[in-house]
Image (cartoon, rainbow, N blue to C red):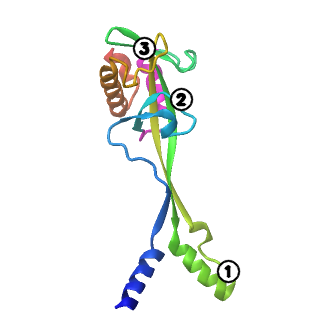
Amino acid sequence: MFKAIAIVLSLFFATSCIPLKIAPNIEGAKVYTGKKFKKGLPKKQVYVFEDPKEANDFYYFLNTKFNTDYDIFGGNVPVIINGRNHFLSFYEIERTTQTVNLLPIVVDAALENKTGTTMFENNYESRSGFWYIALTVSDDALADNLNDEYPQKESIIKYLDHLRNEYLTTDNYLDLVFKK
């Protein structure tokens, strides 16, 4: 009985993967503290969603939707939410899931002891990535509008939800010109 359990546990251990980093799976969107989501983001609260589109698509979307040049405004696109001026900034971020694969390590250790060569050296780790868009919103006083203390936080999130849905459902950004 003990031998059978030891064999099953050994097989389970040998075929398993140990995650080192895990990219979050975000359904819809979520508000995070920027630095906690990814190093390099501001300490402000950020509205984050997965980006299935190509690189720079959100940049083109913003430029077309707001008839502006994101670079000229230094990353702060002026938007009006509930009759008040706000500034929208975005970041394209990659987060990866990285795992250590134990089976190739065990097989290579056995092969190296027998033949002095390895077969799976490039398969010890596996990595897959996801791209995200992180948005910050501030007002004229540069206050963090996604902070829990900000009185209109819920209306800002509704606006960002609408913006996200519009971005994800629009294929040709020139169609946005006709929606205005």
Residue at (67% x, 80% y) in the render: 117
Of callouts 3 and 1, the N-terminal one? 3
Disc assigned to residue 42: 2
Q: Amino acid at mark 2?
A: Pro
SS at badge 2: loop
Q: Position of residue 80 (x, y in %)?
A: 38, 12
SS at badge 3: strand
Residue 78 appears in the rendering: yes
Query: Along the line of sight, which residue is nearer the eye, 174 or 50?
Result: 50
Mark 3 crowd level (few <14, some 14–19, many ≥20, 10 Å Cα): many
Q: Position of residue 86 (x, y in %)?
A: 42, 14
Chain part drawn in magenta: 51-67
Disc assigned to residue 117: 1
Q: Nearer the viewer, mark 3 or mark 2?
A: 2
Disc assigned to residue 97: none
Q: Identify the residue position indicated by label 3 in the image.
A: 86
